[in-house]
Image (tube, rainbow, N blue to C red):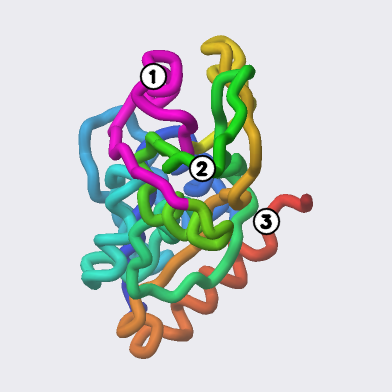
Amino acid sequence: MKTMLNVALPKGRLGEKVYSMFATAGFECPSILEPNRKLIFENEDAGVRYFWVKPSDVAIYVERGAADIGVAGKDILLEYAPDVFELLDLNVGRCRMAVAAKKDFRDNPERTLRVATKFARIARTYYAGLGRDIDIIHLNGSIEIAPILGLSDVIVDIVETGKTLLENDLEPLETIVPISARLIANKASFRFKSAAIEAVAQGLKAQVPAE
């Protein structure tokens, strides 16, 4: 009997792009493309069962073993540090984690720097490396307005094109880390379903776009 792999995919454009990589690698599941509200799809012949979850939840499903493998952004892996294996950089969903501020901002090292972000761990790690004293202001959305309204000095957030920053009179100051989608695996699954997981990883590796 074929080993079935449970695969957590992030909902949205990234997930669709990643699914096409799985399909090209020989792990297609045609029912996933049908217009319906189902969340779980399987193809016994290919040995895969896919399900759509919120991008930030993929790592939780994989870490807890509800999924054997999944695809999560490097930002999620750095921020939540799940206990999973990172198998492959898929080189899609590329963007960067950056510090941004108002165009006229000048840092005063004598003062505690106020940092608005939803990526508190990433921000703390970055500024600890610089020896900079910071005050984290945890926000969940519309982070760009924090410096405009004087709530924070800078923001730490994901930047794709930088257009949103420019439209709000902000500019990126430093890149903290490049971000892209990664194939991750549950540690126990990797031990017990290693051949099936390796087959998927090798199939995907051939689909990874060049730099």
User: Where is residue 106 drawn, in percent x and y?
Assistant: 61, 28
Q: Secondary structure at mark 1?
A: loop
**Which residue type does callout 2 highlight?**
Glu
Q: Is residue 186 above or below residue 102?
A: below
Farthest-out residue, bottom: 191
User: Where is residue 167 drawn, in percent x and y?
Assistant: 56, 10
Circle 2 packing at 10 Å, graded few (<14), some (14-19), many (20+), is: few
Q: Is residue 142 above or below residue 135?
A: above
CB of mark 2 within 8 Å of CB of mark 3?
Answer: no
Q: Residue at x 52, y 12 (%)?
A: 168
Q: Quarter of the image holding residue 77?
A: bottom left
Farthest-out residue, front: 110
The one of 21 and 106 positioned closer to us in this rendering: 106
Q: Nearer the viewer, mark 2 or mark 1?
A: 2
**Which residue type does callout 3 highlight?**
Val
Q: Nearer the viewer, mark 1 or mark 3?
A: 1
Mark 1 sits on what residue? 150
Circle 3 packing at 10 Å, graded few (<14), some (14-19), many (20+), is: some
**131 within the magenta span:** no
CB of mark 2 within 8 Å of CB of mark 1?
Answer: no
CA gap between label 2 and label 3 equals 46 Å
Mark 2 sits on what residue? 110
Quadrant of the snapshot with the N terminus? bottom left
Apparent side of residue 83 relative to residue 179 in the rendered image (left or right): left
The region drawn magenta spans 133-156
Q: Is residue 100 visible?
A: yes
Question: Disc number at residue 208?
Answer: 3
Q: Residue at x 44, y 67 (%)?
A: 184
